[in-house]
Image (cartoon, grey):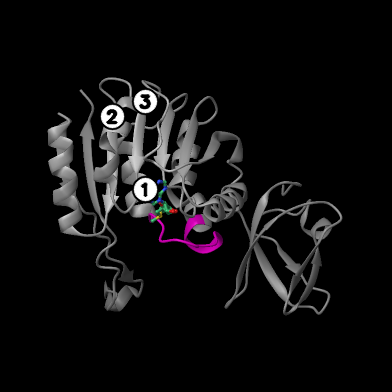
Amino acid sequence: MIKEGDTVWLKDKKNSFFVVLKKGEIFGTHKGNIPHDEIIGKNYGDTVKTHKGHEYILLKPTLYDIIMYGIKRKTQIIYPKDSAYITLKLGVTDGMKVLESGIGSGGLTIVMANAVKPNGKIYCYEREEKYIKNALENIKLAGLERYVETFNQDLSQPLPENEFDAAFIDVREPWLYIENIKKSLKNGSPVGFLVPTTNQVSMLLEELEKHKFINLEVMEILLRHYKPVPDRLRPEDRMIAHTGYLIFGRKI
Ligand SMILES: C[S@@+](CC[C@H](N)C(=O)[O-])C[C@H]1O[C@@H](n2cnc3c(N)ncnc32)[C@H](O)[C@@H]1O
């Protein structure tokens, strides 16, 4: 049953809204208003009507739905095809303390915060306060704010030493901060990076080698969607052909 505090996905053929339910509040759409109280107590898969009679289906959003269709993107985000892999590759799991920089729109933070619960936390260092504010709203939509701590701090500033079990860095010039990141990691911990261009990868690799990181790997993940038509099954004509290169290593 749908309860207060749940994030519900309202969908019709064209539009889609994500609403965090609170008793007494009213959700307004261009097709009319819906009191939250009329949604609370229904089941997922039911429908609800606005005061003008327009119908929406009520769905329970997955984290994928929230990241792809729900969050406000004020920066480029890490897409689920990459964030799911990153989370597994870094071994992010319950109880871990994970360093992340920058937070951007929280696209990756949501996936890693879900993996560290209930005893771990993601520690996000972000230099732009405006992005922290938006990312926290996005993380709240996923109900994961308890597992995230933010610091309005540039990655060039000192980090706590020997503190983190893993790190993921998505900033423009990560090679400038390798010394600092290395000091903040416990020995043997995995670290990952995303950069969009090959020359950035080369600069990063040079610095990682200089600082004796081991198990260096570089990769990209391509995802191709298909048209779901049974008798003419074939790939979509267009795809997102490039998001970023992923670089992984371990501190020794
Ligand atoms: C591409 S966005 C990160 C997107 C994020 N991974 C996501 O999935 O939503 C890059 C972020 O890094 C931040 N940033 C860039 N350089 C930084 C630095 N030196 N220290 C801290 N944050 C930095 C930017 O302000 C921006 O918010």
> Is residue 137 shown left or right of residue 173?
right
Residue name at image x 47 percent, y 31 percent: 116
In depth, the one of 119 and 131 nearer the eye is 131
Q: CA distance from mark 1 to mark 3?
A: 17 Å
Relative placement, left or right, of 12 versus 164 is right
In primary-sequence order, the first of circles 2 and 3 is: 3
The stretch drawn in magenta includes residue 31: no
> Which residue is denoted by mark 1 in the rendering?
83
Query: The residue tagged with tag 2: helix, strand or loop?
Result: helix
**In the rendered image, the vertical position of residue 61 relative to residue 13, given as above or below:** above
Magenta stretch: give its range: 67-79
SS assignment at label 1: helix
Are the residues at dot 2 and dot 1 in contact (C-beta closer than 8 Å)? Answer: no
Crowding at dot 2, Cα within 10 Å, few <14 / some 14-19 / many 20+, comes out as: many
Compared to residue 69, the image places residue 84 above or below, namely above
| Residue assigned mark 3 | 165
Q: Which circle, 2 or 3, is nearer the viewer?
A: 2
